[in-house]
Image (cartoon, rainbow, N blue to C red):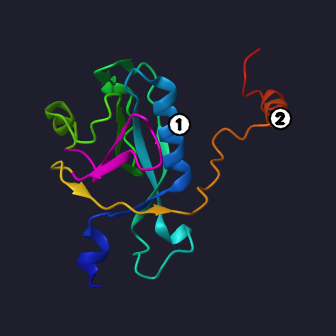
Amino acid sequence: MGLFDRFFRSRHVAGIARDTLEFALSSAEDTHPNEYMGFMRGTPAREFDLDEEVHPDDYVVTDVLVIPGTETNPVSATVKTNMVPNDLRAAGSIHSHPNGVLRPSDADLGTFGRNDVHIIVGYPYGKTDWKAFDREGSVIDLPVLDVEPPEEEFFDITQADIDEEFREGGFER
């Protein structure tokens, strides 16, 4: 691989973690009959023990972010775009079609321009009730991978951490 390829290679999404897909399907079922909307984030494939055919710079979808203030109804989901993080791990979007139709609408296609993979899940939200699409709305193969998503440490705050922050004057009382 040349220097240009290493620095400017387009990120490729190698698959989605089974637990992540199951989370999205369950979330869509919980919001039914309203649409469900989330944004997918990936983890570099090098963090998993994957087949050598997967490039280490590829990504595995491991997270779904639900944006605060998202408004949903049975035919659409509206996201406050100013709340969407500008995330280097962004991989695409995932949303539901409560009517069970697994193809993008014109409105969906208008939002697909960003990122590489967009997933639509549909009623009744079973293991096969989803499809992945590229930016243009063409169906793509997105393998479901049996990998453990990494543990996030962002919210791993203990009472001892809070007490220490108070002692150091980091929090106002």
Q: Residue placed at 39% from the left, 34% from the top?
A: 123
Q: Position of residue 109 (x, y in %)?
A: 17, 39
Q: Amino acid at mark 1?
A: Ser
Tell me where the magenta segment starts and ends, as one range. Answer: 113-134
x%, y% of residue 110? 16, 36
Q: Which residue is mark 2?
A: 164
Residue 63 vs residue 127, the one in the foreground: 127
**Magenta span has 125?**
yes
139 vs 167: above or below: below
Crowding at label 2, few (<14), some or many (≥20) Cα neighbours within 10 Å? few
Query: Considering depth in this image, is 7 or 60 the residue closer to the camera?
Result: 60
On residue 79, the disc is none
Q: Is residue 164 above or below residue 150?
A: above
- Kindly identify which residue carries mark 1: 26
Mark 1 element type? helix
Q: In which quadrant is the N terminus drawn?
A: bottom left
Q: Which residue reaches farthest top? A: 173
Residue 127 shown in magenta: yes
Q: Residue at x 45, y 38 (%)?
A: 125
Label 2's element?
helix
